Image (spheres, grey):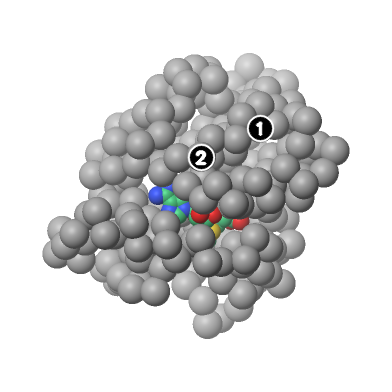
């Protein structure tokens, strides 16, 4: 990926500029594919429910972190219904502003709205049962992704989980000049997670998405 992200500073600033122009809507969050939001959320709910519960080794439902949260599409329909408290972090302040109204009454159970790039964000040690990272890893360089995942591991509570759900390319690293991101193949994402010292606990491919978009995989890590 070294060659692709030739200039790290512009890789990040171009992405910030891109997202500042995107409307704060579900369609905006999903690049015009707002119609797949329900399939996505239902798939995520089934995935996450395998881990949640009262059993000894189960993940608790105290606090979740929504990374690259945007307007809170995932917080609203997946995380707030399942966790007592949810924190949101995103680099685009406008999206977080919108989240306060988009989340409605339930916004009162949001602990923090953090405006920060994940490359700089330091989640509080031992705070989270689940750290959900969806459709945003392509905005981080390999090094920053590995370092962020390491910080996430420290931020987990006992039996906590980090979940990455994202587009995976068919081969190698595919750059997207429009939003200043990259799409990595699944094996590369797996090896970056391993470099961060994380173990893959479970992995699934999201089914029933349109054929023309990248395949989407969900990885549970700890
Ligand atoms: C494709 S949207 C996905 C939003 C949300 N995860 C969802 O699935 O609805 C990507 C989000 O990542 C945010 N973003 C882009 N680069 C980021 C960075 N370096 N750190 C944190 N957030 C970033 C954008 O502002 C945008 O809200």
* Image quarter (top left, top right, bottom left or bottom right) of the N terminus: bottom left
Give residue 86's mark: 1
Q: Is mark 2 on a helix, strand or loop?
A: strand
- Measured from the top left, where is residue 180 in percent x and y? 35, 65
Give residue 115's mark: 2
- Measured from the top left, where is residue 63 in percent x and y? 64, 26
Q: Residue at (41%, 68%) from the top-left corner?
A: 179
Q: Is mark 1 within 8 Å of ligand 1?
A: no
Left of 153 or right of it: where is 56?
Answer: right
* Image quarter (top left, top right, bottom left or bottom right) of the C terminus: top left
Q: Does the residue labelled 2 lie within 8 Å of ligand 1?
A: no
Task: Please say if 173 is above or below 139.
Answer: below
N-term mark: 1 or 2: 1
For this orientation, the residue located farthest to the bottom is 212
Nearer the observer, 1 or 178: 178
- Measured from the top left, where is residue 175 in percent x and y? 30, 70
In terms of image quadrants, where is residue 24?
A: bottom right
In terms of image quadrants, where is residue 65?
A: top right
Q: What element carries label 1?
A: strand
Nearer the observer, 189 or 1: 1
Q: Residue at (40%, 22%) from the top-left corner?
A: 154
Cα distance in 3D space between marks 1 and 2: 14 Å
Res 204 visible = no
């Amino acid at each position: 990926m070294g060659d692709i992200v030739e200039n790290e500073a512009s890789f990040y600033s171009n992405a910030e500029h891109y997202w500042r122009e995107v409307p704060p809507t579900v369609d905006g969050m999903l690049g015009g594919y707002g119609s797949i939001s329900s399939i996505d959320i239902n798939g995520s709910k089934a995935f996450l429910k395998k881990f949640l519960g009262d059993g000894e080794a189960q993940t608790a439902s105290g606090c979740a972190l929504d990374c690259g949260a945007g307007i809170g599409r995932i917080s609203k329909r997946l995380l707030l219904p399942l966790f007592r408290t949810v924190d949101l972090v995103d680099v685009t302040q406008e999206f977080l502003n919108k989240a306060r109204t988009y989340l409605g009454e339930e916004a009162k159970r949001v602990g923090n709205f953090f405006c920060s790039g994940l490359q700089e964000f330091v989640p509080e040690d031992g705070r989270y049962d689940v750290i959900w990272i969806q459709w945003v890893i392509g905005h981080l360089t390999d090094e920053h992704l590995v370092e962020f995942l390491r910080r996430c591991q420290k931020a987990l509570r006992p039996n906590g989980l980090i979940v990455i759900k994202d587009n995976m390319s068919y081969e190698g690293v595919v750059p997207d000049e429009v939003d200043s991101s990259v799409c990595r193949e699944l094996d590369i994402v797996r090896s970056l997670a391993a470099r961060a010292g994380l173990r893959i606990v479970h992995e699934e491919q999201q089914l029933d998405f349109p054929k023309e978009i990248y395949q989407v995989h969900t990885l549970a890590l700890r």
